[in-house]
Image (cartoon, rainbow, N blue to C red):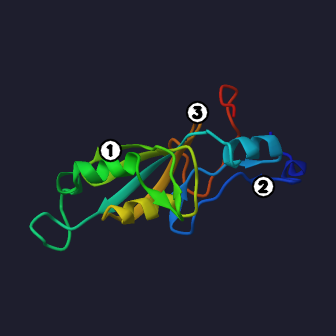
C-alpha cells in the first residue's frame, strides 16, 4: 500500500538519457543504488535498440539492417570497443529482429549504447531498457510505476 511518507528520500538508481525510455528503479536505499550503478556493479541491464545503417548497395538506409550489418561489426559491439580512452566491458549483443538489437551491459557509461552503435556504423532510432537484474519492465505502461514483487530483489 502506498503511503506518502515513502516518497521521503526516494531517488532514481541510474538514469535514462532524454532520448531513451524504459525501466527506471527508484529507491530509498543507498546500498541498492550502489549495487545497480556503482563503479564495481555487475548488475545486468538489458536494452532493445532499434537501429538503421547504410544498405550494402550504397543506398541511404538498409531495409533489413541485420542482413546489411557485418559480423565484424557485431564482434566489435560484443567486445573490442573503447569509449573515452577506456576499454568497455564485454557486452551480450544479439539480433531481436531484422532492425532491433538486444544489448545486455554490466556498465553504464554516458550514452554508451548510442556511442557503441555509432562506432560500428549504426544509427540508433530508439532505445528502451527492458530489464535490470531480474526485474523486467514487462507490459508496464509508460509513466506508470509498481512496487517490486516478493520474488524480485537486487
Residue 93 left/right relative to 30: left
Query: Would residue 146 be visible to someone looking at this image?
Result: no
Q: Helix, strand, or loop for circle 2?
A: strand
In percent of width and height, residue 92 lies at 42, 41
In the figure, 55 relative to 100: above or below? below
Look at mark 1 in the image and give the residue it sits on. 96
The residue furthest bottom is 60
Look at mark 3 in the image and give the residue it sits on. 134
**CB of mark 3 within 8 Å of CB of mark 2?**
no
Task: State the residue at coordinates (51%, 68%).
Answer: 19
- Picture disc at residue 11: 2
Q: Assess disc 3: are there few (<14), some (14-19) or many (≥20) residues with their C-alpha within 10 Å of its C-alpha.
A: few
Q: Helix, strand, or loop for circle 3?
A: loop
Query: Would residue 150 be visible to someone looking at this image?
Result: yes
Nearer the observer, 115 or 102: 115
Q: Quadrant of residue 148?
A: top right
In three-dimensional space, the C-alpha distance between marks 3 and 2, rounded to whole angstroms, equals 20 Å
In percent of width and height, residue 93 lies at 38, 44
In three-dimensional space, the C-alpha distance between marks 1 and 2, rounded to whole angstroms, equals 32 Å
In percent of width and height, residue 119 lies at 37, 64
Task: State the residue at coordinates (82%, 46%).
Answer: 30
Amino acid at each position: 500500500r502506498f503511503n506518502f511518507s515513502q516518497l521521503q528520500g526516494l531517488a532514481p538508481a541510474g538514469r535514462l538519457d532524454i532520448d531513451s525510455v524504459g525501466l527506471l528503479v527508484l529507491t530509498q536505499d543507498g546500498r541498492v543504488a550502489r549495487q545497480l550503478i556503482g563503479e564495481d556493479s555487475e548488475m545486468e541491464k538489458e536494452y532493445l535498440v532499434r537501429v538503421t545503417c547504410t544498405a550494402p548497395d550504397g543506398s541511404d538506409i538498409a531495409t533489413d539492417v541485420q542482413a546489411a550489418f557485418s559480423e565484424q561489426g557485431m564482434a566489435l559491439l560484443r567486445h573490442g570497443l573503447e569509449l573515452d580512452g577506456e576499454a568497455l566491458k564485454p557486452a551480450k549483443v544479439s539480433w531481436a529482429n531484422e532492425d532491433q538489437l538486444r544489448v545486455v551491459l554490466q556498465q553504464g557509461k554516458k550514452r554508451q549504447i548510442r556511442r557503441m552503435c555509432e562506432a560500428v556504423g549504426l544509427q540508433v532510432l530508439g532505445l528502451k531498457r527492458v530489464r535490470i537484474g531480474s526485474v523486467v519492465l514487462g507490459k508496464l505502461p509508460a509513466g506508470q510505476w509498481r512496487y517490486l514483487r516478493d520474488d524480485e530483489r537486487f
